[in-house]
Structures are given as structure tokens and as C-alpha cells.
Amino acid sequence: MSKQLGLWIDHRKATIVTVTENGEAISEILSDVEKQLRRSGDSPLKGPYEALQVPADDSRQRTLTAELNTYYDEVIGQIRDADSILIMGPGAAKHELQKRLDENHLGEKIVGVETVDNLTEPQIAARVRQRFAQ
């Protein structure tokens, strides 16, 4: 039984459309990634920041990267058993996921990576059906 999968992804959520001979299923994975990590400490209006109250930028970047890796691992866990994968999305997340799939030896399953704007679930499903009908 062939399992074809379309995935729309950005840093906030992933919508997965699975197409099999038995029909299609749509699922969604939400990320816990906070794009703009908040700085703790006093407000600038109260006076200068002390160095220890503000996390370093590299620390903030490490936190963001760790959250994204957890999110991508969850997505990969959901799509691992697909025979063909179409990845879509508006930003860098689709390429980051493609790189992670290559690292996990799943890159050969990718049939395309497309840049698309925000789509509704029915639009994603229609695009996936159209791609795999060819």
C-alpha cells in the first residue's frame, strides 16, 4: 500500500496530509517555538540593564535551535513511514526540515519542496492530491 504525504510547515505549525488507497487524513503539529525569546530584567525606563539580567544572544539562539530541533523531530516521527513526501511552506522551515530528513537518511523520499503562502487545510489537501495524481 502506497503512502503519499504532503506537508505544509513553518516554525509555528505543520499540517500533514496523508493520502493512501483508503483515503486521506489530515493532522496538525503545533510547535512550542517562541520566535522572539523574551529578555528578562528591568525595563529600560527603570535604568540600565545589568549584564547578568539579560541572556546572551548566543544563549537565546541555542534555546531557539533546541526548540526547533524538538519540533522537527516530532514532525519526522509522524512522516517517517511515508513512501513519498512533498514539503511546502512560506519560509526557511521547509529547507531546515529537508536538511534534517537528509541527515536521517529519509531525503530520497522527498519528491518536491515548494514555496507557498499560508494555505487552509483543504487547499493543502487539494495541492497534495494534485501533485500525486500526476
Image: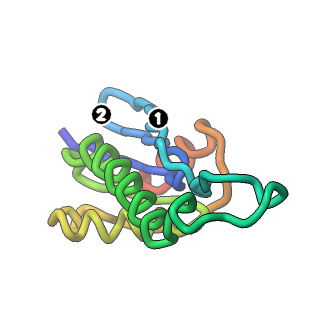
Q: Nearer the viewer, residue 92 or 68?
A: 68
- Alpha carbon distance from label 2 to label 1: 21 Å
Q: Nearer the viewer, residue 88 or 46?
A: 46
Position of residue 62 measured from the top left corner of the image (x, y, whole percent): 39, 64
- Residue pointed to by mark 2: 21
Mark on residue 116? none
Q: Residue at x 24, y 62 (%)?
A: 109
Regarding mark 1 in the picture, which secondary structure is present there? strand
Q: Residue at x 15, y 66 (%)?
A: 105
> Circles 2 and 1: CB distance less than 8 Å?
no
Position of residue 132 measured from the top left corner of the image (x, y, whole percent): 41, 53
Amino acid, disc 2: Glu
Regarding mark 2 in the picture, which secondary structure is present there? loop
Amino acid, disc 1: Glu
Mark on residue 28? 1
Q: Residue at x 50, y 51 (%)?
A: 8
Q: Is residue 71 left or right of residue 130?
A: left
Q: Residue at x 60, y 51 (%)?
A: 40
Quarter where residue 134 is shown: bottom left
Could you classify mark 2 by the number of other residues whose Cα lies within 10 Å: few (under 14), some (14-19), or many (20 or more)? few
Q: Nearer the viewer, residue 128 or 41?
A: 41
Q: Earlier in the sequence, mark 2 or mark 1?
A: 2
Q: Nearer the viewer, mark 2 or mark 1?
A: 1
Position of residue 39 measured from the top left corner of the image (x, y, whole percent): 61, 56
Position of residue 78 measured from the top left corner of the image (x, y, whole percent): 29, 40
